[in-house]
Image: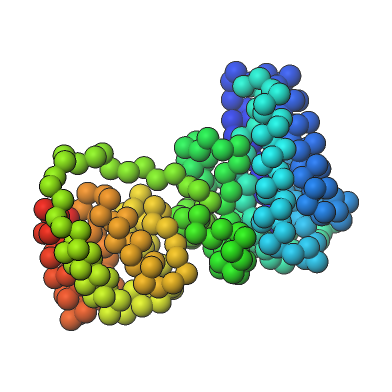
Amino acid sequence: MVALDVQGYGAPPRTDFHRSAVHDGLNEALRRAFAAAAVEWDSCVWQDGGDGALILIPSAVPKVVVLTHLVRHLTDEVREHNEASSDAARIRLRVCLHSGEVRRTDHGVVGSGIILVSRLLNSAELREERTNSLDPITLAVTDGFFRDVVAHHPAAEPEKYREIRFEEKEIATSAWVKNAVAVRKPDAPAQVAPPAGRDEDQLNSLVDALMEVPSMADDVSRRAVLARLPRHIGSAIPYHPRARLHVFEIVRTCQDYENGVTALITALRTLEGDSVPVLRAEVAARKWLDEQGDIG
């Protein structure tokens, strides 16, 4: 299923004239994109929301086709519309993908998947991602869609996705945003860098120590750790399907934020207590930070 919404549809300086251009332009862009991706439009269930839509695509259509071909063609079509439009008539979309069962009723369709993808679409976290992006489309996928589809297809570029946490009404869970923009801490005063080889040795020692902590050993457990980091740090950490490389990303991203590494150790202690592996990881973290003159 595809859920999408136009940013700022009802906001000034848009008039009804501009909204008509946006509405017509979006519908035309969608139909062209579906045709270019060889997805039959008439086989889909379409709910028009004026400033957006919910589109249910038959399960016979490969999900990776929707993820790669359809989204790419839609991006191209929206970009073409924007190039020929005034600023008030341009389209900037939030697009969310999910897969799941739905039930037809006399007046439409229902399903827990529709609720999930709708909550993600309307979440403050995804709206912020849209605001921070210059691209015509900000793409997000649910956690299940990422793990079942994106992570298994190199053409989907899973390395370009970043995990975020979002809360909207009754839903509080993870999702994945492609090419999300992270707000970094202000640049610290310039420092003399330690010899690269020694720094890398200490970093590898820290990663080794973290890999010995049970909460960092597998993907599900690492997600529990990231959920206990400050949101702006946890949501900025790139995902990697290989455990060790994911831990590298966790450490490097935490380093980019003030007290980020300390927050990581605190999260581990919350889950593991003062276990021997956690204490070893803390010692390794201090050694690594001391090498860089960073108190973490």
Instruction: Name the spot of residue 3 as percent of width and height, x first.
Output: 67, 49
Image quadrant holding the N terminus, namely bottom right
Who's the residue at 50% across and 55% down the image?
161
Residue placed most toward the observer, 177 or 52: 177
Q: Is residue 146 visible?
A: yes
82 horizontally vs 28: left or right? left
Q: In the rendering, at what x and y percent does residue 152 appear?
A: 59, 69
- In this picture, is 54 found above or below 26? below
Residue in view at x 15 percent, y 57 percent: 195
Residue at image position (18%, 67%) is: 202
Q: Relative to 280, is 42 above or below?
A: above
Seen at 74% across and 64% down, the residue is 62
Q: Position of residue 209 (x, y in %)?
A: 23, 75
Total numbered badges shown on the rendered structure:
0
Q: Horizontal placement of 225 versus 82: left or right?
A: left
Residues 93 and 247: in front is 247
Instruction: Let me know if residue 269 appears in the view.
Output: no
Location of residue 141 by image quarter: bottom right
Q: Is residue 210 above or below residue 173?
A: below
* Left or right, residue 62 beside residue 121: right
The quadrant of the rendering that contains the C terminus is bottom left
Vertical placement of 233 versus 240: above or below?
A: above
Q: Position of residue 246 (x, y in %)?
A: 39, 66
Looking at the picture, the colour scheme in use is: rainbow
Quarter of the image for residue 242 reads: bottom left
